[in-house]
Image: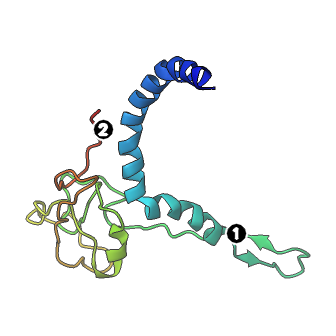
Amino acid sequence: ALPGLTRTVDAARPLVRALHVAARDLVPVVEYLGAYRSEVMAPFMNVAAATQDTFRAPGARDALHYLRVLIPLTNEGPVNQPRRLPSNRHNAYMRPRALDRLPYGLESFDCGHLGNPPALPVAGSAPRSCDVMQPWSLGGRPPRAFQQLARTPP
């Protein structure tokens, strides 16, 4: 059986080389998705939670399911602003589980816009202080404010 196994392993070398190249690109993606596993799963769980409620209209035989959604309306949405408002707390590169801080105020990518003049008064309550998100590390690489995926070295 050993000569047959040797021929099989020798024949599989091109496949293994091709898979190794693909895996070098795939490993960083899997690491990234692993860091954000809560954020990846949340939309699937929220669909069930948003559609589970029912309503039975008076005289109706069957109950109807309806979609529960919350549409945030702020003074930044309906009109275009010439500059970011000082009440804006943007962060397109949130760290994993960043929404856990929602009751205390989300971290911002930067706070350089706080000196901008407010074009409109703040709708609702004014945001808390502007806290800048600290750099974080992924896969043993140096901490960064936003992560860049790079091919795994051979």
Query: Three-letter amino acid code at disc 1?
Result: Tyr
The residue positioned 51% from the left and 70% from the top of the image is: 70
The residue positioned 26% from the left and 60% from the top of the image is: 90
Mark 1 touches mark 2? (CB < 8 Å): no
Which residue matches tag 2? 152
Q: Nearer the viewer, mark 1 or mark 2?
A: 2
Under circle 2, the secondary element is loop
Q: Is residue 103 above or below residue 133?
A: below
Determine the image quadrant of residue 64.
bottom right
- In the image, 116: left or right of 58? left
Which residue matches tag 1? 66
Q: Which mark is residue 54?
A: none
The residue positioned 41% from the left and 56% from the top of the image is: 34
Q: Is residue 151 above or below residue 145?
A: above
Depth order, front residue of 35/85:
35
- In the image, 36: left or right of 111? right
Q: Looking at the figure, which quarter contains the N terminus?
A: top right
The image shows residue 68 at horizontal and vertical percentages of 61, 71
Is the residue marked by circle 2 packed among few (<14), some (14-19), or many (20+) residues within 10 Å?
Answer: few
Q: Is residue 66 above or below residue 94?
A: below
The image shows residue 49 at horizontal and vertical percentages of 62, 72
Q: Looking at the figure, which quarter contains the C terminus?
A: top left
First in residue order: circle 1 vs circle 2? 1
Report how far apart the C-alphas of labels 1 and 2 lie in the structure: 46 Å
Query: Three-letter amino acid code at disc 2?
Result: Thr
The image shows residue 125 at horizontal and vertical percentages of 29, 81
Under circle 1, the secondary element is loop
The image shows residue 66 at horizontal and vertical percentages of 70, 69
